[in-house]
Amino acid sequence: METIISREKGQTIILVALLITVLLLFVGIAIDSGIAYGVKAKLSSAVDAAALAAGKALGQPGTEGDRINNATLAARTFFAANFPDGYLRATPTLQDPVIVNDTATGQWNISVTASATIPTFFLRLSDRTTFTAQSEAAATRSDLDMAFVIDTTSSLQSPVDYSEAVRDDAKSFVDNFIESSDRMALIHYALGAVVDEPINTTGRGFNSGNIRSDIDNFSFGGRTNFSEAFWRARDQLNSIPDANRSSLRVIVFFTDGDPNSFSSTFTDSSGGTHLGVISTDSTGPTSTYLPSRQRESGGPYGLNAIGQITSNVTYNVSGIPTLPSYFNVGGVTVTSTEFGVTVNTLGATWRPVSSIRNYTNVNLASRNLAEDMAKRARSEGIFVYTLGLGTNLTLLKGPYPGETGENLLKRMANDPRADTYDPSQPVGLYCFAADPVELEQCFDKVASKILRLTR
């Protein structure tokens, strides 16, 4: 009997030993797996940080080779900071990022891959001495096509002269972008609009020196023609062939006032046609400018088909009895029905305009056109950012009830604060500056928003 009991005790000890071994193995698997999971999570976080850092570094100025080298260095630095060697006894290995530039769209594609070898504790009992965790991350950095539009009307010099601050802040804004790969057109406007620097339609890049020089040479004077300026900005972006456009397209529009003028092809009482601008003063009951073009240094001038000053031609406003049905700056041989003057082509908030040439109709048409053009641009995937300087924009002005310049600029940008905000279209930003100090901050804020979209 005692022999049988002893034999059973021996078997029990063996079973307990086996169970303890199995239990320890399971505990070991749980511990080693937990360590492996922690390493994997840390590795994924480090790889994500490396990819984002590489994308940000690609957004800094320099040659393509310099940008790739800086991106590679940034990826290594951020990976090492987020996954130090020896973390949970793991040995990390980061491969150099794979960075590919799609020169047609200006998009940089970044791929980062890393691994970490983790020594085991308990699984050594099963001859498993290490785990290897792997992780990949991808990021993109988009170069951009931008049209930069600057108000050079007389109100920026009188009663307070803000012209130098506008020049300085505009040049600082330009410096945020990459001369070698981003594209930029420069347009300034008053009663008419001039494309100072056309956008690069074939290659990439822009000439920062030329743009800065153009800004320095601005003269200020004249009324406010939003629509021609915005039309030319959109036209510059759309002049780039579809296959060569950047994935990010932007219009940045600066002003200190409300629109009171618009361009088109006008018909006089004898049936003759004139390409020019019609304008109102701030409160007057009638149009005070005839189809004409006022250069910023003063004096009415005629327009050619691309909006440049050509000759000293003045038309008698009394000879233009009615407004045209549509905006058309393509010349008398071009018919355009894209944007209506007396016809509602796009605007859900369209202000009714009749064909009678008077203050109310000219002013309302000026507002409609600016809003419609911005809406059309956004429907084409273009982001719109507007900047306003001075308390004049906060005042109720013009014949449209309860409207300030800020209302219009918010709508143009599709700012979430706008009463016409449409989340299905690109969401921009309106930034108000009460003075030049705040204007510098607004330009910085807009630049930051745009650069964030490139990542």
Image (tube, rainbow, N blue to C red):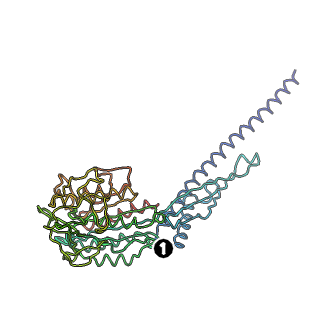
Residue 296 placement (x, y as % from top left):
23, 75
Splitting the image into 4 quarters, where does residue 158 fall? bottom left
Q: Nearer the viewer, residue 370 or 71?
A: 370
In this rendering, is residue 168 above or below 123? below
Amino acid type, mark 1: Gly
Residue 210 placement (x, y as % from top left):
37, 78
**SS at mark 1 in the image:** loop
Splitting the image into 4 quarters, where does residue 79 fall? bottom right
Could you tell whether 423 is left or right of 124 in the image? left
Could you tell whether 188 is left or right of 248 in the image? left
Number of marks: 1
Residue 190 in sight here: no
Residue 246 in sight here: yes
Label 1: how many Cα within 10 Å (few below 14, some 14–19, many 20+): some
Splitting the image into 4 quarters, where does residue 174 fall? bottom left
Q: Nearer the viewer, residue 51 or 293?
A: 293
Residue occupying the point 30% across, 78% down: 216
Q: Nearer the viewer, residue 7 or 71?
A: 71
In this rendering, is residue 41 above or below 251? above
List the residue tagged with mark 1.
62
Residue 261 placement (x, y as % from top left):
21, 65
